[in-house]
Amino acid sequence: MKIYRSGKPLAIIAAIAKNYAIGNNNTLLWHIPEDFKWFKKLTMGHTIIMGTNTYLSLPRRPLAGRKNIVISHTHKYDLQGAIGANSIEEAIELADADNENFIIGGASIYKQFMPLVDKLYITYIDQTYEADTFFPPIDANEWQMTQCYPQQEEHPLGLRYEFRVYERI
Ligand SMILES: NC(=O)c1ccc[n+]([C@@H]2O[C@H](COP(=O)([O-])OP(=O)(O)OC[C@H]3O[C@@H](n4cnc5c(N)ncnc54)[C@H](OP(=O)(O)O)[C@@H]3O)[C@@H](O)[C@H]2O)c1
């Protein structure tokens, strides 16, 4: 039987620029439709876990077809059908025991979950961005890239990006 770091199967999913930038002014830094498709395909039917800022940044919330867990100290916003958790530990208690649960951001949540997850699904965007939020370092002594699917936007000057999967060494 597989042993999970937190006792539950947890994975981070994030889109990260070359300089580890992930967001600015509580929005994403790029618009890559193929990345939305990749995110949807992986997370559909699963539990997703996020912080308040990320939840509030979603254009439509909760994200349909998924159990949405929102971590907050205060829960002063209307969760509109999402499930509230008061801590990282409570979110893990609410997570699924048998199916992969996806940590979908943002920066503060990624940082706290980094030691607890078993897998990283990273869209690596081969460009540097000005940003106010960043992903934590991916330590090469701890993480091994096991899958990589290079992509390029169809436009001739299109962004180059890769869908990467990392597993713990
Ligand atoms: N590129 C990507 O893949 C990606 C993905 C997601 C988000 N983002 C970007 O990331 C940015 C948002 O990140 P962020 O760090 O500002 O916000 P966040 O992590 O989404 O949310 C932070 C909030 O979560 C709650 N929280 C965090 N840790 C907690 C804990 N241990 N216990 C209880 N509550 C806790 C607090 O909410 P309360 O204040 O309610 O207590 C805190 O203010 C945005 O720019 C967004 O677009 C990027």
Image (cartoon, rainbow, N blue to C red):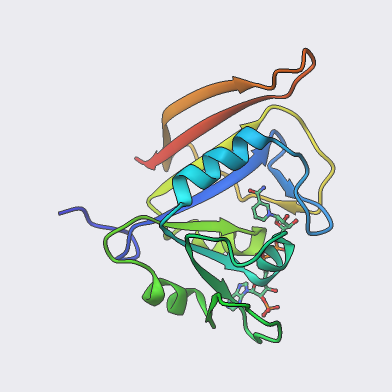
Most foreground residue, 51 or 36: 36
Relative to 69, 62 lies left or right? right
Q: Quadrant of residue 143?
A: top left
Relative to 46, 85 lies left or right? right
Relative to 167, 70 lies left or right? right
Name the residue at the left extreme: 1
The quadrant of the rendered image in which ligand 1 is seen is bottom right
Name the residue at the top extreme: 156
On-image quarter of the N terminus? bottom left
Count of numbered tags: 0
Residue at the image point whose x is 47% and y is 43% from the top = 41
Location of residue 120 with respect to 59 vertically, above or below: above
Location of residue 139 with respect to 92 vertically, above or below: above
Spot occupied by residue 122 in the image (x, y as percentages of width and height): 54, 40
Location of residue 11 with respect to 90 vertically, above or below: above
Residue at the image point whose x is 60% and y is 67% from the top = 62
Spot occupied by residue 117 in the image (x, y as percentages of width and height): 42, 56
Most foreground residue, 86 or 43: 43
Spot occupied by residue 139 in the image (x, y as percentages of width and height): 51, 42
Spot occupied by residue 43 in the image (x, y as percentages of width and height): 47, 51
Location of residue 104 with respect to 122 vertically, above or below: below
Residue at the image point whose x is 81% and y is 54% from the top = 132
Residue at the image point whose x is 62% and y is 79% from the top = 72
On-image quarter of the C terminus? top left
